[in-house]
Amino acid sequence: MRTDPDAVQCLISEDDFLKFQEFFYRKTGIQFENSKRYFVDKRLVERMEATGSASFRSYFTMLRFQATGEELQCLTNLMTVNETYFFREEYQFQCLVGSMLPELTTRRAKGLPIRIWSIPSSSGEEAYSIAIYLLEFWKGLAEWDIEIISSDIDTKILTAARQGLYSARSIQHLPARLLKKYFSRRDDGYQASMDLREAVEFTRVNLSEPADTRSYRDFDIIFCRNLLIYFDELSRKAAAETFFDAMRPGGFLCLGHSESMSRISSIYKIRKFPEAIVYQKPTEAR
């Protein structure tokens, strides 16, 4: 018998919301403000129904102490927003091939791959956009090996990214020539070619969990766009340090157009290239 959503929602008190808010923040770094109360309550109700929990208290107990962490992952998948499209903020991809990579390769010994990290991956549009841009516009691709890693906390969206199926909205900014070259028409949209899908490795990472990010090292370029706006000041600073540790000296960090590292941390240098402003780990880093 299904629980009436309105009745269950009434059981989520202000104190319940505050407890969940603090718990989810500790686990993910994402801070839900009071203005997001309806959004949060609706998804909590959905998971309470799905798990047969009679009260918020019983659901919250399971959420905190379940050994597998499966329910926390299901709820996290529901709580995260995935909104993107191909060639979003294209000027940064232009900066990638026009300024960042040429500078990096002048001081890099041949034989070491260039490593790029895209986080959050969402449904893969950013990582695949990077791959397309390299294939189409970077002459150095013939001389250098590239590794593209794309990570997200949401396991469901990672599955979608690996499948590479996209709606007309997602590909609306792709030139027709590139759409034809890298995608096949499907009944429900467009699918990225196998070669393009194999160019990116997708991994599950919680940026707020040190155990998840400890092995992520030696990146030359990190794209983290429009994620830190969901973090509070403390979580943003922690993320900035995580990226700093994950990069090689001289590496670059790209943020979203509304984000600024100068308001978060002073450990990066600001680099003003013709195409974009990015942030650099000093070549003689701490």
Image: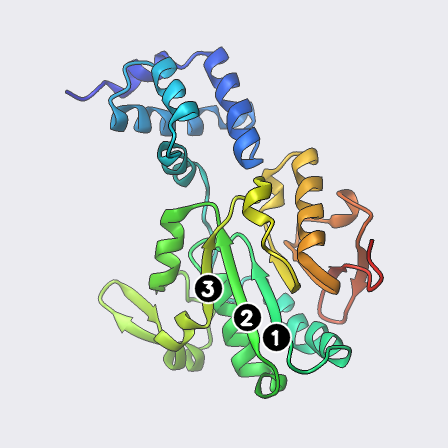
Looking at the image, residue 188 sits to the left or right of residue 219; the answer is left
At 68% from the left and 83% from the top, the residue drawn is 110
**Callout 3 secondary element:** strand
Crowding near the residue tagged with mark 2, few <14, some 14–19, many ≥20 C-alpha atoms within 10 Å: some
**Few, some or many residues within 10 Å of mark 1 (<14, 14–19, 20+):** some
The structure's colour scheme is rainbow
Which residue in the structure is indicated by mark 2?
147
> Are the residues tagged 3 and 2 within 8 Å (C-beta)?
yes
CB under 8 Å between callouts 1 and 3? Answer: no
Residue 71's quadrant in the figure?
top left
Residue 178 on image: x %, y %: 44, 79
Q: Please tell me which residue lies in front, 114 or 83.
A: 114
Residue 229 drawn at (x, y percent):
62, 42
Q: Give the left or right position of residue 4, taking residue 11 as reference.
A: left
Q: Is residue 201 above or below residue 67?
A: below
For disc 1, the marked residue is 113
- Could you give the CA–CA distance between mark 1 and mark 3, rounded to whole angstroms? 15 Å
* Of pointers 1 and 3, the one earlier in the residue sequence: 1
Residue at screen point 53% across, 32% down: 27
- Position of 226 relative to 23 (above/below): below
Quick one: label 3 or label 2, which is nearer the N terminus? Answer: 2
| Residue where numbered disc 3 is placed | 201
Q: Amino acid at mark 3?
A: Glu
